[in-house]
Amino acid sequence: MKNKKKLISFIAIFILGFFLIANFVLAQGVAGTTGGSNSSSKTKITLLNPLSCDNVGCVLEKIIDAIFKISIPITVLMILIGAFQILTAGGQEEKFKEGKNTIKWAVIGFALVILSQGFVNIILDILGMKK
């Protein structure tokens, strides 16, 4: 029981880490700009906005979109784990219920992610921050 929970936690953290690393952005230099304070050089250093957002509402939308994109594979994985638990129950009622609960909570969690996306959109619309 503890080993299964550790395995599930490890897989979920691995998938989450994979998506976070895949979206990691490195700094990009602009041609003709240099660091430091050379007074003879008249070059400007400009910082590019990787989010392309100019207000809090846009940042919230980007965060919710990222959570939604991460939640899809995690939900599928948890449903597959629950199905595997049901298939390997071998007539044991407790293991069958455990698999059923895994699937139930995966679906409930995904529904909450979808609802949170809707709530953020409603709040941004009320505040007038929606594009």
Image: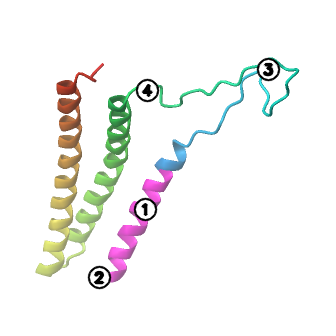
Q: Earlier in the sequence, mark 3 or mark 4?
A: 3
Name the element at disc 2. loop
Q: Is residue 120 magenta?
A: no
**In this rendering, position of residue 44 left or right of residue 21:** right
Q: Is residue 82 visible?
A: yes
Q: Which residue is mark 4?
A: 53
Asked whether disc 2 touches disc 4, contact meaning CB atoms under 8 Å apart, the reply is: no
Nearer the observer, 25 or 106: 25
Asked whether disc 1 touches disc 4, contact meaning CB atoms under 8 Å apart, the reply is: no
Asked whether disc 2 touches disc 1, contact meaning CB atoms under 8 Å apart, the reply is: no
Q: Which residue is mark 3?
A: 32
Marks 2/1: CA–CA distance: 18 Å
Amino acid type, mark 1? Ile
Amino acid type, mark 4? Cys
Amino acid type, mark 2? Met
User: Residue 1 falls in which quadrant of the image?
Assistant: bottom left
Q: Earlier in the sequence, mark 2 or mark 1?
A: 2
